[in-house]
Image: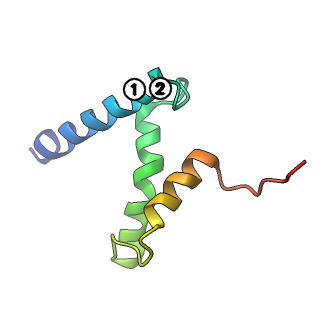
Amino acid sequence: MFYSRIMEPRLHHFFQMIERAQLHGELRQDLDPLMLIGLFAGPFFTRLLLSSQLAPRSAHWPEQVVEAVLNGVAVRHES
């Protein structure tokens, strides 16, 4: 019941957002939407499980997560 009433509608909404971004060329089309949801949601659940805090101390943390997912975490070397 929890899944069908709470999770499923939210996942459906996220799937639609990702598919729309893929159609507009904002995200790669070869990536599975569920995997992308995991990449974005994973850091929040990890923070909650490891520190008992869903809200980070830094107000910029959500943007840092999105930036790391979209642009990677490797150091970029200027050529």
Q: Is residue 49 above or below residue 32?
A: below
Q: Position of residue 14 (x, y in %)?
A: 32, 38
Whether pointer 2 and pointer 1 mark residues with C-beta atoms closer than 8 Å, the reply is: yes
In the displayed orientation, state which residue is furthest to the right: 79
Residue occupied by mark 2: 22
Q: CA distance from mark 2 to mark 1?
A: 5 Å
Label 1 neighbour load within 10 Å: few <14, some 14-19, many 20+:
some
Give left or right: position of 68 versus 24: right
Q: Is residue 26 above or below residue 45?
A: above
In depth, the one of 4 and 58 nearer the eye is: 58
Question: What is the number of the mark on residue 19?
Answer: 1
Q: Position of residue 36 (x, y in %)?
A: 46, 40
The image quarter containing residue 59 is bottom left
Question: What is the number of the mark on residue 48?
Answer: none
Residue type indicated by callout 1: Glu
Give left or right: position of 18 versus 31: left
Give left or right: position of 41 versus 64: left
Q: Secondary structure at mark 1?
A: helix
Q: How many marks?
A: 2
Q: Secondary structure at mark 2?
A: helix
Label 2 neighbour load within 10 Å: few <14, some 14-19, many 20+:
some
Question: Which residue is depicted at the point 31% across and 29% down?
Answer: 16
Tell me the quadrant of the picture where the N terminus can be found: top left
Residue type indicated by callout 2: Gln
